[in-house]
């Protein structure tokens, strides 16, 4: 694809120029398109053009905070593999691996069970070519295969892990009007040419995807969100788990019960920033509706466990013991930072309660410690 699209005066197009042209041609842009374009467009997309993770980037995720996070997930994966009958070949799949840190830690920890390693084929679902390069380095030696989306994954039993993947999936926002729900889209101000929100006059058919309680509540002006992208991914994964066998672990910030509210957020340099002022230059995400994901998984015939809090999940996997083991082998300064990282992962004032964990399975198994 030609990435340096030229405008009529030979100038390089910016993401705003590109979106303005699309709006001029097709009318206001759906929020799901805005997210798709600003996050994963191969030329302009936020993920496509940088590594946003880590202290020098825009945000820090749990695997970047502590090696213990990925290690415990690796052990969870080994136990889950045993629970599904220790298949001699299986797909170990990560959705949106970022820097590859979590998978790297998980694979190192799971070396405790060599048969798990012999059996696994590593598959990564990653839209960003920039991040694929980083993953290639961090996972050198494991020969991963990359996929653009979950729909091209190979057959066979799978163990799937996803941390902070679903929050990046495009959403639709619906605004309650006196007669129904109307889609909120992106437009451009005629005078300033800057992006603005606009509410469509007609009612939206997407309201049928809202939870019945949300659909029938809400004062005029209130916002509800739905991610048909996430629902379709959950459906595809659940069908795969039912027909091919396997389990999935989904960790993300979000809410247990579908609710009203605007959770769209932009983050840049570790701070919340204005969504419209930072299109393409900030991480644009929304809180995950775990109830909606579970409903999609159940509808496809699979079982959804949880969600439970990240804190309950990590505590029951033994994060305290792992912390003390690591601290014993460290000097004073390192030990304090290992302890501080553990607190950040489980403290309810930090990530402990906001982040939830859900597990999906094709058949009944004991997947979520802490339930
Ligand atoms: N799981 C990592 C990174 C989270 S950031 C961690 O916890 O550190 C979100 C990740 O999902 C990035 O790797 C991003 O490039 C990827 N991603 C975002 N949207 C995607 C999409 N539509 N398809 C595939 N990957 C996507």
Image: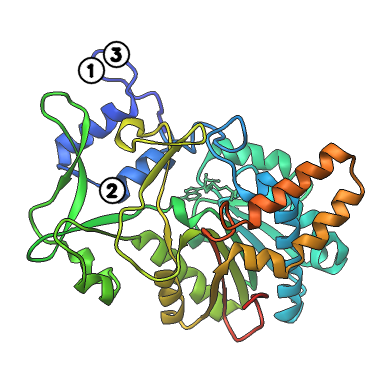
Query: Visible in this render: residue 144?
Result: no
Identify which residue, 45 or 143, lies in the foreground. 45
Q: Is residue 220 left or right of residue 54?
A: left
The residue that appears at 45% across and 80% down in the rendered structure is 298
Q: Is residue 34 visible?
A: yes
Q: What crowding class fits label 2: few (fewer than 14 Cα within 10 Å), some (14-19), or many (20 or more)?
A: many
Which residue is the site of mark 2? 31
Residue 25: x percent and y percent?
16, 37
Residue at screen point 39% across, 66% down:
231
The residue located at (63%, 60%) in the rendering is 93
Q: Which residue is mark 3?
A: 10
Q: Are marks 2 and 3 in contact (CB under 8 Å)?
A: no
Q: Nearer the viewer, mark 2 or mark 3?
A: 2
Q: Is residue 211 left or right of residue 67?
A: left
Dot 1 lies on which element?
A: loop
Q: Position of residue 281 (x, y in %)?
A: 42, 31
Q: Is residue 323 left or right of residue 340?
A: right
| Quadrant of res 358 | bottom right
- Quadrant including the C terminus: bottom right
Number of marks in the rendered image: 3
Labels 3 & 1 near each other (Cβ < 8 A): yes
State whether label 2 is within 8 Å of ligand 1: no
Q: CA distance from mark 3 to mark 1?
A: 6 Å
Residue 235 appears in which quarter of the rendering? bottom left
As drawn, the label of residue 86 is: none
Q: Earlier in the sequence, mark 1 or mark 2?
A: 1
Residue 8's tag is 1
């Amino acid at each position: 694809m030609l990435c340096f699209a030229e405008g009529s005066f030979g100038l390089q197009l910016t993401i705003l120029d590109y979106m303005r042209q699309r709006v001029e041609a097709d009318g206001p842009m759906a929020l799901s398109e805005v997210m798709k374009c600003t996050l994963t467009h191969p030329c302009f997309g936020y993920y496509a053009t940088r590594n946003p993770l880590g202290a020098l980037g825009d945000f820090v995720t749990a695997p970047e905070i502590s090696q213990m996070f990925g290690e415990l997930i690796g052990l969870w994966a080994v136990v889950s593999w045993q629970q599904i009958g220790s298949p001699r070949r299986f797909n170990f799949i990560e959705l949106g691996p970022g820097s590859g840190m979590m998978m790297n830690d998980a694979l190192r920890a799971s070396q405790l069970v060599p048969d798990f390693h012999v059996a696994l084929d590593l598959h990564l679902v990653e839209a960003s070519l920039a991040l694929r390069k980083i993953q290639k380095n961090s996972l050198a030696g494991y020969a991963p295969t990359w996929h653009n989306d979950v729909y091209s994954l190979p057959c066979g039993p799978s163990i799937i892990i996803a941390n902070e993947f679903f929050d990046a999936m495009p959403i639709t926002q619906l605004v309650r009007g006196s007669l129904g729900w109307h889609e909120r889209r992106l437009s451009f101000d005629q005078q300033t040419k800057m992006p603005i929100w606009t509410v469509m006059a007609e009612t939206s058919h997407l309201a049928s995807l809202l939870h019945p309680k949300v659909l029938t509540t809400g004062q005029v002006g209130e916002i509800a969100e739905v991610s048909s992208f996430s629902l379709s991914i959950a459906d595809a994964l659940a069908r795969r788990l039912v027909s091919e066998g396997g389990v999935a672990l989904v960790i993300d910030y979000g809410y247990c019960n579908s609710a009203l509210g605007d959770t769209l957020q932009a983050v840049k340099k570790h701070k919340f920033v204005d969504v419209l002022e930072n299109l393409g230059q900030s991480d644009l995400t929304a809180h995950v509706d775990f109830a909606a994901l579970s409903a999609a998984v159940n509808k496809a015939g699979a079982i959804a466990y949880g969600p439970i809090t990240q804190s309950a999940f990590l505590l029951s996997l033994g994060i305290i013991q792992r912390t003390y083991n690591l601290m014993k082998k460290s000097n004073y300064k390192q030990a304090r930072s290992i302890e501080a990282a553990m607190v950040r992962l489980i403290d309810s004032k930090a990530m402990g309660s906001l982040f939830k964990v859900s597990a999906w399975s094709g058949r009944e198994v004991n997947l979520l410690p802490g339930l």
